[in-house]
Image: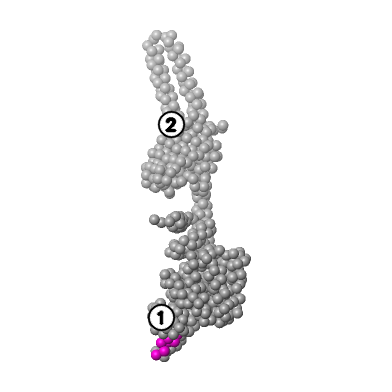
Amino acid sequence: MLKKESLAEKDRLNLNKKFLDYLLDQDNSRAVRRSVADAAENLYKLNDKDGFKRASQMLLELSNEKNDTLHKAKAYKNLGTYYLDFQKNDSSYFHYLKAEELALMAKDEPLLGNIYLDIAFIKLFESDFTGSEISASKALTHFSKTNQYGVYDAYNIIGVCSNELKNYERALEYHKKALGVFREHNLASPFHLGASSLNNIGYVYQNMDKDAEAIVYFEEALSDKTLFRDNPGLYAMLLDNLAYSKFKLRDLNGLPGLYERSLSIRDSLKTDPSGIILNKIHLSQLYDYLKQDDKALQIAKDNLAFAKANGVASDVLGSLKQTSIVDKGNAGNYFQEYIKLNDSVQQIERKAKDKFARIAYETNEIIDEKDKLEQQNRNLLYIFIGTLTIVMLLFVIRTQRAKNRELMLKQAQQKANEDIYNLMINQQNSIEESRAREKKRIAQELHDGVLGRLFGARLNLDSLNRQNSEDAASKRNEYLTELKNIEQDIREISHDLNREKHALISNFLAILNNLLEEQRSSFEPEVTVNIDDSIQWDELENTAKINLYRIIQECLQNINKYASAKNINLSIKKLGNDLSLTIADDGVGFSTNTKKKGIGLQNMVSRTQELNGTFDVRSKKGKGTTIDVKFPLHKKGE
């Protein structure tokens, strides 16, 4: 069964993974990128290296998309940490250099401090002690007073590098500074930073052959009762160092027990093969001093085989040296192997130093090349945008000119049509005036001719009614025939008047029918027309007829151009004192929510407003269009 702590850690891990998946579906905001960075940090603390890498790559993609320099720097730093944990120092160093460049741009001092500190660790692992010391010193200039853990680590690295460079006084100075930071700020850590600093100081004294001083620091560190429980690896290292300093002073009290206890702890941990190798070298030296040659030789040979299997050159060198001392018969062979391996190690260390310089140089070259490409791309983009803008302007100007020409042509055509229609109306007015004169003439003829003849016939018939002769009867028949003739004349005059009235009424309808016949003959849609017979067209103002005609004409034009309709229904009705026009089609329709309306539609609205009427258009895409126009009927002279 899992412990509660394990369950809690597992739950936290799952929650962070689910949170990361949730963030994938969110908009790429700064808050989301900050949350991804937090999730990456949590996954690293929970030792989910794969999840940590995934979150860091996600952060890099989001930051690149929004050109977020700070979070891009954090993403590169995370990837550097990931590769550092897997001892892929080349990849780690490359990503840290990218992070450094971006952090400098973002002016984030704490981030820069941590980047320089990690670079210092990389160079320390690669035995570039001078480079490591320089990077750690840089880190110190960027750490704030609140980041005392960073300050401690930087002091510690400088101390380790100085010790390796045999600058022991400087090493002591910085290890003691690190110990001072630990004690002043009471830095809490499961790794026992204080004991680690005491061990480092003792180790420097040991290298200075001041083993008495070294023992003081080793024993002080070992006096911590919780050290073995919390950090058994450090505890084993202190035991080995204490035993070695005692051995150098030829104080064999507790030996080889201290060595054997240290070796037992390291064997059980299986995390420090280099410590095991050094432990056995010390143990072989002790048995050699005690003249237990077989034991010393056996330990040395076993240790050399283990060191070669482990593959760390410095460990193999130490084992070769000790084996050559205790195996005097083969000392020459061991010595030759030692020299060859030592030369190889020195070359590797030089290459490591050159490697970091080369990576830095190549990274700068890549950055410079990237900057050049970005500048070229910007220039190309500017040229493309400029060219596109000019082309668009020319296209807009040309299109606008064409539209203006089309509009002017339509306006001219409309004006010509209105002039023609007005001319037709004027002709109609002239005809009406002529017909009015003719009516007057006919009325005069009726009064002066027909009525006079009727009056004479009536008087003669009255006088003949008093006579009974055959001659009177004959004359009465003559007068009856005359009355029939007068009746026929009146009928003919009446028929002429009716035809005149019908012609007057039908004049506007004839013009409208001509338009509809032209529509039927020239375009595909079937046109159905329904016109109310009760409309008194001769009493309608000419301007109303013109506007009505133009609205119908514009509707038909729009249907022909845009609607792709198969049927058109046109209806003109009299509704009380109003005239109603409805034109409906079964075409493709359009969205009436569009703010911009065409010139034709605007003209129809304008003409309806001139009639003091209402204009309504109903349409849906795929459902056709219906236009309703309604305006009050005003008779001539009103």
**Residue type at the position of mark 2:** Asp
Q: Report whether 314 appears left or right of 223.
A: left
Residue 564's place in the image compared with 473, above or below, is below
Which quadrant does the N terminus fall into? bottom left
Q: Is residue 510 above or below residue 112?
A: above
- Residue 460: image location, x then y, percent: 45, 15
Question: For the point 57% across and 74% down, which residue is it?
Answer: 216
Q: Quadrant of residue 143?
A: bottom right
Q: Which residue is mark 2?
A: 533
Q: Residue 509: where, in percent of width, then height? A: 44, 37
Viewer-proximal residue among 214 and 550:
214
Residue at the spot of label 1 = 299
Residue 544 in picture, x, y percent from top left? 52, 37
| Mark in front: 1 vs 2 | 1
Which stretch did the figure color magenta? 321-329
Q: Is residue 183 left or right of 381 when viewed as pictured?
A: right
Which amino acid type corresponds to the residue marked 1 in the rendered image? Answer: Ile
Q: Taking 566 as reference, is 194 left or right?
A: right
Q: Name the image quarter holding the C terminus.
A: top right
Q: Which comes before the other along the chain, label 1 or label 2?
A: 1
Numbered label attached to residue 431: none
Distance between mark 1 and mark 2 Cα atoms:
128 Å
Residue 322 on the magenta span: yes
| Secondary structure predominantly adopted by residues drawn in magenta | helix
Q: Is residue 503 visible?
A: no
- Residue 435 screen position, x and y as percent: 49, 33
Label 1 secondary element: helix
